[in-house]
Image (cartoon, rainbow, N blue to C red):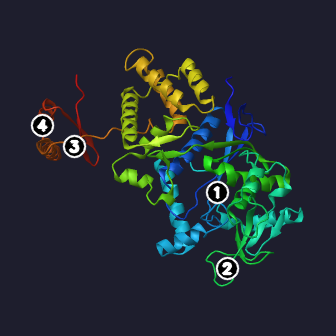
C-alpha cells in the first residue's frame, strides 16, 4: 500500500490522509457565485477538486461531495462593502436575480459536463438554506460572538485568540495599520453574518430574521451547508488560494465558535490560472469562458489536459501556445490509445499501476503521473504480447485523468465529391440488387484508398489503413 499524502494548508505540511470514518470521505468544495459565467481560471480549481475526488476513489474511498451554489450574499468586496453580486448581475442583464441564478447555474453545469468534471453528489443553493443560516447565526449570538451595527450582524473576531491561523494573519499589524474606513465594525477582521436590507429600497432577495429583514453574508452559507450535509467535522474542504485569507478563515472562525472544530481535517487550495502573468478574474472585464474556447475550435478537454501538466499548488500561466501544445498532446495520447486493439481481456500492468499510484498519492502529482502514461504508451507501442495490458493500463490511468480516452473516436475525413459519387452509385446498385456492379464499385473505391461500411440507414466512408 502506497499512502496518500496531501498538503494541508492549515498545518502547512504534507500529511498522510486517512478518513475520519472508515472508508467514507466527506468533501466540501466552494462552488460558483452565479452572477455571471465562470471563467477558465475558476475551472482550474474545479478540475483540481475533480482530480482529488478521482484520486480518493482510486484509493478505495467512497466520497460524498458537496459543492455550494452561491446565489445570494456575495458582495463585490470581501470586506463586506459594495453591492451584492447577484443584484449587480441582475441589473447588468436586465433580468431578475432569480433568473440569472438559474441561467448561470445551468451554464455552470454544462461547463462541468464539457470538461468531464463529475457532478457533485449534492449541489445546494444558498437561497434554499436560509433557515439553517439563521439558526447558525442565532447560536453564535447566544454564545456571545456577535454584535449589531447599523447595516448588519457581525462576527466579533477578537473573541478568538487564534483567529486567522489558516492564513497566518498578522492581526496586530492589521489593527495598527488601519487605513480604510471599517464603518461600525469593531475590528478590521470582523465580518458580516447578516446584512440588513436598505431602508429606502427593496432587494430582490431578502428574508425576515430575528434581527430584521435582510440577507446572509457570504461566509455563513458554507459553514451552515457543510454542517448540514457533512457534519461539523469532516475530511476535506477545498477552494481557490484566494479563499485562504478571508472566506475560509471566516468559515473556520464561525464553526469553531459554534461547534468547537475547524470544520475540516484537511484544507486544500488550488492555485491561480494566470493570463499574461496576472490573475484571471471577472473584475478585469475580459475573461475566457469554456464556451469561448469551444467557439475558437478548441476541445474543452484540451484545457483539462493543460491543467494536468501543472501541479495544483503551482500557478499556471495560460497562453494560446500552451493550449495549442495541450491540443497536440491530447491528440497524440488519444490516437495512441485508439491504435491499441480493443477487446482484450488483459489486466493492467501491476508495476505501472504502482508507479502511477506513487505519483498521484504524492499530493496529486499529475504531471509525473502523465509522464508515466506517456512512458507506458511508448514502451509497448502497438505490437507484442503486452498490447492488451497497455490499453488496460492506460484506461485505468484515465479514471484519474478524466480525458475520456475509451469513448473518443477519431473524426472521419470528409470524402471528395468523386468518392461520394462512387459510394452513392454503389448504394443505388445495392438497392437494385445489382450485386456485380456494387462489388465493382467497392473495388474501385478501394483502389482509391476508401472503404465503404454498409449500415441499416445507409453507409459510411473511411480511408483505408495503409497496408
> Which of the marked residues, 2 or 4, is nearer the chain's N terminus?
2
Q: Which numbered marker is on residue 68?
A: 1
Q: Nearer the viewer, residue 171 or 115?
A: 171
Residue 337 sits in quarter: top left
Q: Nearer the viewer, residue 279 or 421?
A: 279
Provide the secondary structure element on which disc 2 rests.
Answer: loop
Tell me whether the residue at label 2 lies in contact with that at label 4, contact meaning CB atoms closer than 8 angstroms. no
Q: Which residue is mark 4?
A: 441
> Which of the marked residues, 4 or 1, is nearer the chain's N terminus?
1
Q: Real-space Cα distance between discs 2 and 4?
A: 79 Å
Q: Real-space Cα distance between discs 1 and 2?
A: 26 Å
Provide the secondary structure element on which disc 3 rests.
Answer: loop
Image x and y of residue 458, in percent: 24, 47
**Above/below status of 398 relative to 180:** above
* Farthest-out residue, right: 143
**Above/below status of 273 relative to 330:** below
Q: Is residue 249 visible?
A: yes
Q: Which residue is mark 2?
A: 198
Provide the secondary structure element on which disc 4 rests.
Answer: helix
Q: Residue at x 74, y 58 (%)?
A: 189
Q: Residues within 10 Å of mark 4 (few under 14, many from 20)?
A: many
Q: Which residue is mark 3?
A: 414
Q: Real-space Cα distance between discs 4 and 1?
A: 60 Å
Image x and y of residue 181, in percent: 69, 66
Q: Real-space Cα distance between discs 3 and 4?
A: 19 Å
Provide the secondary structure element on which disc 1 rests.
Answer: loop
Q: Is residue 392 visible?
A: no
> Which of the marked residues, 1 or 3, is nearer the chain's N terminus?
1
Q: Nearer the viewer, mark 4 or mark 1?
A: 1
Q: Residues within 10 Å of mark 2 (few under 14, many from 20)?
A: few
Amino acid at each position: 500500500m502506497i499512502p496518500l499524502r496531501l498538503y494541508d494548508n492549515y498545518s502547512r505540511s504534507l500529511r498522510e490522509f486517512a478518513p475520519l470514518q472508515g472508508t467514507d470521505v466527506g468533501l466540501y468544495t466552494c462552488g460558483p457565485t452565479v452572477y455571471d459565467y465562470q471563467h477558465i481560471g475558476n475551472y482550474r480549481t474545479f478540475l483540481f477538486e475533480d482530480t482529488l475526488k478521482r484520486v480518493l476513489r482510486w484509493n478505495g474511498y467512497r466520497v460524498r461531495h458537496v459543492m455550494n451554489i452561491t446565489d445570494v450574499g456575495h458582495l463585490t468586496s470581501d470586506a463586506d462593502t459594495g453591492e451584492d453580486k447577484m443584484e449587480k448581475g441582475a441589473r447588468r442583464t436586465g433580468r431578475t436575480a432569480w433568473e440569472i441564478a438559474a441561467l448561470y447555474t445551468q451554464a455552470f453545469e454544462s461547463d462541468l459536463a464539457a470538461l468531464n468534471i463529475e457532478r457533485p453528489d449534492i449541489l445546494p443553493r444558498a437561497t434554499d438554506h436560509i433557515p439553517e443560516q439563521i439558526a447558525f447565526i442565532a447560536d453564535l449570538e447566544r454564545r456571545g460572538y456577535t454584535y449589531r451595527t447599523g447595516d448588519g450582524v457581525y462576527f466579533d473576531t477578537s473573541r478568538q485568540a487564534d483567529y486567522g491561523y489558516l492564513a497566518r494573519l498578522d492581526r496586530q499589524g492589521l489593527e495598527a495599520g488601519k487605513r480604510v474606513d471599517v464603518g461600525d465594525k469593531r475590528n478590521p477582521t470582523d465580518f458580516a453574518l447578516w446584512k440588513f436590507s436598505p431602508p429606502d429600497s427593496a432587494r430582490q432577495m431578502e428574508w425576515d430574521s430575528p434581527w430584521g429583514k435582510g440577507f446572509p453574508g457570504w461566509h455563513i452559507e458554507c459553514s451552515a451547508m457543510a454542517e448540514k450535509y457533512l457534519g461539523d467535522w469532516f475530511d476535506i474542504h477545498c477552494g481557490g488560494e484566494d479563499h485562504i485569507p478571508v472566506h475560509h478563515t471566516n468559515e473556520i472562525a464561525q464553526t469553531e465558535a459554534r461547534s468547537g472544530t475547524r470544520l475540516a481535517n484537511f484544507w486544500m487550495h488550488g492555485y491561480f490560472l494566470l493570463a499574461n502573468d496576472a490573475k484571471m478574474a471577472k473584475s478585469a472585464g475580459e475573461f475566457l469562458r469554456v464556451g469561448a474556447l469551444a467557439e475558437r475550435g478548441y476541445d474543452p478537454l484540451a484545457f483539462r489536459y493543460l491543467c494536468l501538466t501543472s501541479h495544483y499548488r503551482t500557478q499556471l500561466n495560460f497562453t494560446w501556445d500552451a493550449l495549442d501544445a495541450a491540443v497536440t498532446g491530447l491528440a497524440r495520447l488519444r490516437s495512441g490509445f485508439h491504435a491499441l486493439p480493443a477487446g482484450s481481456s488483459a489486466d493492467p500492468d501491476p508495476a505501472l499501476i504502482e508507479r502511477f499510484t506513487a505519483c498521484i498519492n504524492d499530493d496529486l502529482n499529475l504531471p509525473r503521473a502523465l509522464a508515466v502514461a506517456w512512458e507506458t504508451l511508448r514502451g509497448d507501442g502497438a505490437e507484442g504480447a503486452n498490447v492488451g495490458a497497455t490499453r488496460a493500463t492506460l484506461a485505468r490511468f484515465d479514471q484519474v485523468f478524466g480525458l475520456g480516452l475509451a469513448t473518443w473516436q477519431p473524426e472521419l475525413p470528409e470524402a471528395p465529391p468523386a468518392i461520394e459519387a462512387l459510394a452513392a452509385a454503389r448504394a443505388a446498385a445495392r438497392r437494385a440488387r445489382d450485386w456485380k456492379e456494387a462489388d465493382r464499385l467497392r473495388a474501385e473505391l478501394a483502389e482509391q484508398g476508401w472503404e465503404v461500411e454498409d449500415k441499416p440507414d445507409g453507409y459510411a466512408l473511411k480511408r483505408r489503413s495503409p497496408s
